[in-house]
Amino acid sequence: MRLVIDLQGAQSESRYRGIGRYSLSLARAIAENRGDHEIIVALSGLFPDSIKPLKNIFKEVIPEENIGVWNAPGPVCEYDTDNQWRRTAAEIIREAFLESLDPDLVFISSFMEGFADNTVSSIGRFSADVATAVTLYDLIPLVNPKEYLERSKLFRDHYMRKIEDLKKADGLLAISEYSAMEGIEKLGLEKSRVINISSACDDVFQIIDPGESDVLDRYGISKPFVMYTGGADSRKNLSALLSAYSKLPEYLKNSHQIVIVGKLKKAQIEYLKIVAMSLGLGKHDLVLTGYVSDRDLVELYNLCELFVFPSWHEGFGLPALEAINCGAPVIGSNTSSLPEVIGIADALFDPYDPEDISDKMLRTLTDTHFRRTLTDRQSEHAKNFDWNISAKKALSFFEEIVSGKKSPLLSKRSAVIEKLVSKIAAITEALPSDNDLRSAAAAISFNHPKNEDKSGKNER
Amino acid sequence: MKILKMYLARSILCLLSFRKLKRPLLSLLKKFPFIESLLLRFYYSKHKKATDNKYGAPDLDRDAMEIYAMLKDRIKNEENAI
């Protein structure tokens, strides 16, 4: 099988977030576990700074000539309505390039981006014949439209357009059982088109000896602490976390701090401080660290007394797994994907009930036997999450898809150009400027050079 | 025009910071996507300065020039057909 991996997920703004790490780790594991399959990594020229670092990573596992770069006219971010023509043209141009690589299957590592960055993704704009598989992280905006879609018409239009395209994929690789179930239910797909390949975390998240580290001083942590890391949007349920913490007995509150790790918006910081104050928590009870490096994060996971993940909706819940791998006892919500990650029923609570969260916190902080059992069983459970397992599941799913779909015949360059020109000329949503046409022509010429030597299996 | 647009975006963002005005303003903006787009452009430009500066008119080699001519020609034909 000739597999083309569209790795924009590791190039875009998402490369600093979970999606970027997931895209990169999975693609690398797929390349390492490829067996007889041929892997080609396709990178977008619209993220020029990311190309060299990614090439350096992948040339260790696949031949350098199997890393291809494509171009398209930019910018294409969807929040800017002026980009409409360029975006549509870029979608056609990207698909044509991927098809020219003669793939049996195209795997798209991240599909929903492109609103605020120059990610280009689509299915079926150039030809509907190429088998396509896409990672399904979550459908949080679709499930919670009030919170995520109703505030911006432009974002809603972008998201719903992506959802419609997502439904055209031959296969979806969900990152958890919950996410797979959500895909089947909310997108109305057949079960056979969705598979759970799960997730894993980076090797850096492990038990270490922080030794003489000054990490606690740097973040103003002066007592044993209860930790949370992640975003602060409403589904993360941080006010319930603070409310639960405030219900702990006084002696525990006096001897602990609650530490929220991660970069938050100014308004979120203010909000959390107000909530903490209204719950009677003192100035030094709540610590907001702001952005921390991976190294500090690992140390904080290793040093915390307890890690709490109260989110009521996750696609996977990576911080919980990272904390487990660092030896922290982890408790979390009994909703969405978190029971799969946390694994132990005794470690779960109802995220809508601060009393229940507080009870679980109290038990973990005071019952030494429970704590030990929790960490032992959780570290055993964490062994199920391994990039090699996920990569092998993905590859066998790809084989299944490919066996049921005939790959298109590879066209000659002139035919591809002809088809591209007529598809781009037929764009009716907006009009191009002369500069747009020049950029499109330059991109097409770059993607399909005249001396292109096709070694494809079935050229026509 | 650019400066005018910037002031418009700034004023709307300023009005949005008043809680009582937020909801009616947001529902009004939904009816005018171009203003929403203008606000988002202003908002994101603070984070990604000069994002668009790198997209200048590219120099075209002979091959790209041929494709450009084809595109231009075909789009003209499409317009005439409409």
Image (cartoon, coloured by chain):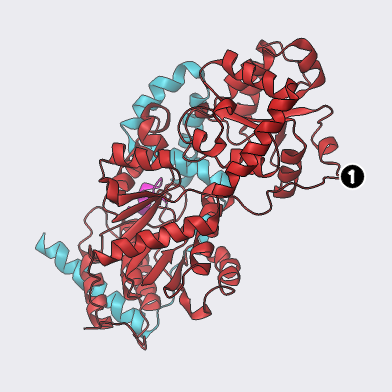
Chain colours: A red, B cyan
Question: In the image, residue A141 lies at what x, y percent?
Answer: 40, 35
Q: Quadrant of residue A158?
A: top left
Task: Give the answer, above or below, for where A304 lies relative to A406.
Answer: above
Question: In the image, residue A444 lies at what x, y percent?
Answer: 35, 74
Stretch of the chain drawn in magenta:
A77-84
Task: Give the answer, above or below, for where A229 lies relative to B64.
Answer: above
| Residue at 53%, 68% in the rendered image | A32
Whether residue A82 appears in magenta in the rendering, the answer is yes
| Residue at 34%, 31% in the rendered image | B30
- Relative placement, left or right, of A207 versus A91 is right
Task: Give the answer, above or below, for where A284 lies relative to B52.
Answer: above
Q: Quadrant of the N terminus of chain A?
A: bottom left
Q: Chain under label 1?
A: A
Q: Secondary structure at mark 1?
A: loop
Q: Would residue A296 be visible to someone looking at this image? A: yes
Question: In the image, residue A128 lies at what x, y percent?
Answer: 22, 62
- Relative placement, left or right, of A110 versus A52 is left
Q: Would residue A262 be visible to someone looking at this image? A: no
Find disc 1 in the rendering and name its residue.
A212
